Amino acid sequence: MKNNILKLILGLILMAMVTACGEKKTTETEVRKGNYRIVDNTIVFDEPQRIEGQKSVLQFTVDPIENVRIGFIGLGMRGPDAVDRMTYIDGVTVVALCDIEPDRVEAVQTNILEKKGLPRAAAYTGREGWKELVARDDIDLVYICTDWKTHVPMAVESMRQGKHVAVEVPAATSLEECWQLVDVAEQTQRHCMMLENCCYDFFELTALNMAQQGLFGELIHGEGAYIHNLEPFWHEYYENWRLEFNQNHSGDVYPTHGLGPLCQAFNIHRGDRMKTLVSMGTPSYNGKKIAKEMMNVDDFANGDMTTTMIQTEKGKTMLIEHDVYTYRPYNRLYQLTGTEGFANKYPTEGFTLLEEKLPAGFLPEGQHLNPHAFVPAEVRDKIMKEYLHPIAVEIEEKAKEVGGHGGMDFVMDYRLIYCLHNGLPLDQDVYDAAEWSCLGELTAASIANGGMPVQMPDFTRGDWNKVQGYRHAK
Ligand SMILES: NC(=O)c1ccc[n+]([C@@H]2O[C@H](COP(=O)([O-])OP(=O)(O)OC[C@H]3O[C@@H](n4cnc5c(N)ncnc54)[C@H](O)[C@@H]3O)[C@@H](O)[C@H]2O)c1
């Protein structure tokens, strides 16, 4: 009896020792590296608290703005076309233009505004001129088309000066910058929309509409990419900002074209959220070569090909690729796999559908669909017409005429102004901007740790499940 009690006590002591050792081991494996910790083999970035007085901007609206007065900053390759597109939209005034280089501002004044009989805009130049532009009291919206590093300082100051912001992709280049955009939008109660134009391409919009109507069943997997050899453009970026950025940053530094349209289809922060990612990068070969030629440097951080997998809270997966260096056809992948159907944009636009998902009489008498192949071209063309997203119906023709990547840029600008005119939530909110842009730093951290999983931050701070289903406001 005594022996048994002794054995029991010894056993309990041993168990306590094992448990204590286990706990110690867990804390021992928690390693801090800069702004993240590695906990149980997962990278966990620090997440700032929402400060007092700061309010969520989910589904955020402001009073209708009858005439949207715009100030543009950044008139390089991208900016002038944005000014031009806006001149086709009623209820818009181009109030001010800014670029470091005076001749770029002047070119827009003469080639776009004067040519169309519109008044010249106020002009700002030099590196700091934009600060005067955003301080004006007759601007509603600041439209930013500068290099990546200047997006956040400009967006933040604009919001602090009471302006709404539209900012080119990616909106931010680090996690800290992503949080800054979210926090300042919440503090100032201003719109901050990233200009992710690929959400407005006609195939993506049609597929989104079909997904929302259940034609693909339950979406389980999506693929997106930015595969675009930038060789013809490297010399064109102002002061070489893009190659220089890539030289210093590994990871998917330009993820939003691939990710944005998927996040809308997967209802990200409208019922689901991106939870974990893992990323891997190849060595740099072609990037290194161009950097040697242009910058005379030997090191190049950005791998020629970066591949990232994301898993959502509901367990769905997305594959995102980045390659701006190799000799391949342009490709954004854009692929949706559902339990009952499939959409694919590159290199072949097509759908695989179950016949019964289409309305009665949609297919010509006697025609059947093969669930192991794309629908025939004439069925695809009919789908593209009949499932055109409602937001594109009335402006498709004008968008194709005005242009901008085949019309999608115009649909984007048109929607931005439509929502502001009507006091509606914008199609992309500041949480989208942060979620899509944060991949840069998160993928770099995963790569730096051998493809380790990264816990994705919740920029909505717990509100990701409040809205059910992504919808364009009407
Ligand atoms: N959505 C798309 O399809 C798409 C396509 C191309 C570029 N972009 C984005 O547009 C942005 C601009 O790209 P780009 O190709 O026009 O680059 P760019 O180098 O041709 O133009 C950048 C312009 O910003 C100006 N600028 C920089 N700092 C400034 C400052 N402090 N004040 C005023 N002006 C300043 C420069 O003078 C230059 O004219 C980038 O964010 C890029 O990612 C998006």
Image: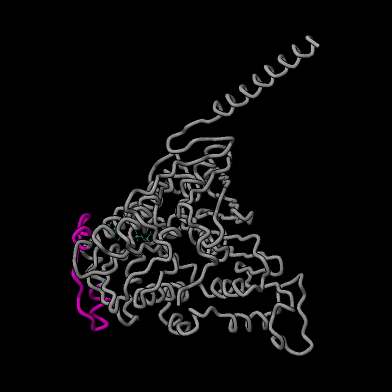
Q: Is residue 129 magenta?
A: yes
In the image shown, does 309 or 74 lie closer to the viewer? 309
Can you give x and y, in whole percent of width and height, for residue 446 in the image? 54, 42
In the image shown, does 249 or 24 lie closer to the viewer? 24
Which quadrant holds residue 128?
A: bottom left
Q: Is residue 98 left or right of residue 22?
A: left
Q: Residue at x 34, y 48 (%)?
A: 51
Q: Is residue 447 left or right of residue 402?
A: right
Can you give x and y, in whole percent of width and height, for residue 47 in the image? 43, 44
Q: Residue at x 78, y 9 (%)?
A: 2
Q: Is residue 182 left or right of residue 464?
A: left
Tell me if residue 16 can be seen: yes
Quadrant for the N terminus, please: top right
Can you give x and y, in whole percent of width and height, for residue 280 in the image? 58, 45
Q: Quadrant of ligand 1?
A: bottom left
In the image shown, does 237 or 4 lie closer to the viewer? 4
Q: Eyeballing the image, is 403 above or below 35? A: below
Can you give x and y, in whole percent of width and height, for residue 346 in the image? 60, 67
Q: Eyeballing the image, is 430 above or below 249? A: below
Q: Is residue 289 magenta?
A: no
Q: Eyeballing the image, is 212 above or below 327? A: below
Q: Is residue 217 left or right of residue 258?
A: right
Find the residue positioned furthest to the right. 1
Query: Which range of residues does the magenta coloring cover?
Result: 109-133
Q: Residue at x 19, y 61 (%)?
A: 135
